[in-house]
Image (spheres, grey):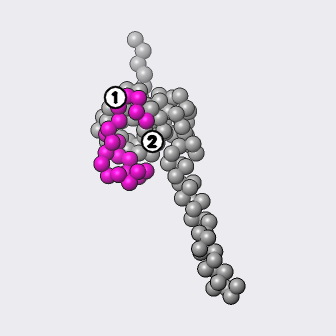
Amino acid sequence: GKSIEEREIDSLLVQPGDTLKVLPGTKIPADGIVTWGSSYVNESMVTGESVPVLKEVNVSVIGGTINLHGVLHIKATKIGSDTVLSQIISLVETAQMSKAPIQKFADYVSNGF
């Protein structure tokens, strides 16, 4: 029979549609759907919720979160800048770069109109 060598790959090489094996204690490399296995995942970095979330077959996972206990096989659906985490980072950066309307008014008033 054939044996398939398991190895860690760079998340930059992951393409949508790839099936990835995620071991306990490792980061989920891309947004995807669980195709096999079940585990609890720490999503606190995205949701703020400290309680781990159970992930089973046909349930979505978020790239960058941590698989805590079981082995998961996931089918990658979104990678790179399309992932939930990348979109959150982009929104935060945009919000930090733009001033709130009240801040613009305060700057206007403090500069003597």
The type of residue carrying mark 1 is Gly
Secondary structure under tag 2 reads loop
User: Residue pushed farthest right?
Assistant: 113
Q: What stretch is highlighted in magenta?
A: 40-60
Q: Position of residue 74 (x, y in %)?
A: 43, 31
> Where, quadrant-wise, is the N terminus in this rendering?
top left
- Res 71 visible: no
Splitting the image into 4 quarters, where does residue 103 fall? bottom right
The type of residue carrying mark 2 is Ile
- Res 68 visible: yes
Q: Position of residue 23 (x, y in %)?
A: 36, 36
The mark found on residue 62 in the picture is 2
**Residue at figure coordinates x 30%, y 48% from the top left:** 51
Mark 1 or mark 2, which has the lower sequence index?
1
**Residue at the disc numbered 1:** 37
> Where, quadrant-wise, is the C terminus in this rendering?
bottom right
**Residue at figure coordinates x 61%, y 65% from the top left:** 97
Magenta segment includes 66: no
Magenta segment includes 46: yes
Q: How many labels does the image show?
A: 2
**Residue at figure coordinates x 40%, y 33% from the top left:** 59
User: Residue pushed farthest bottom?
Assistant: 112
Secondary structure under tag 1 reads loop
Q: In the picture shown, does residue 15 fall above or below 42? A: above
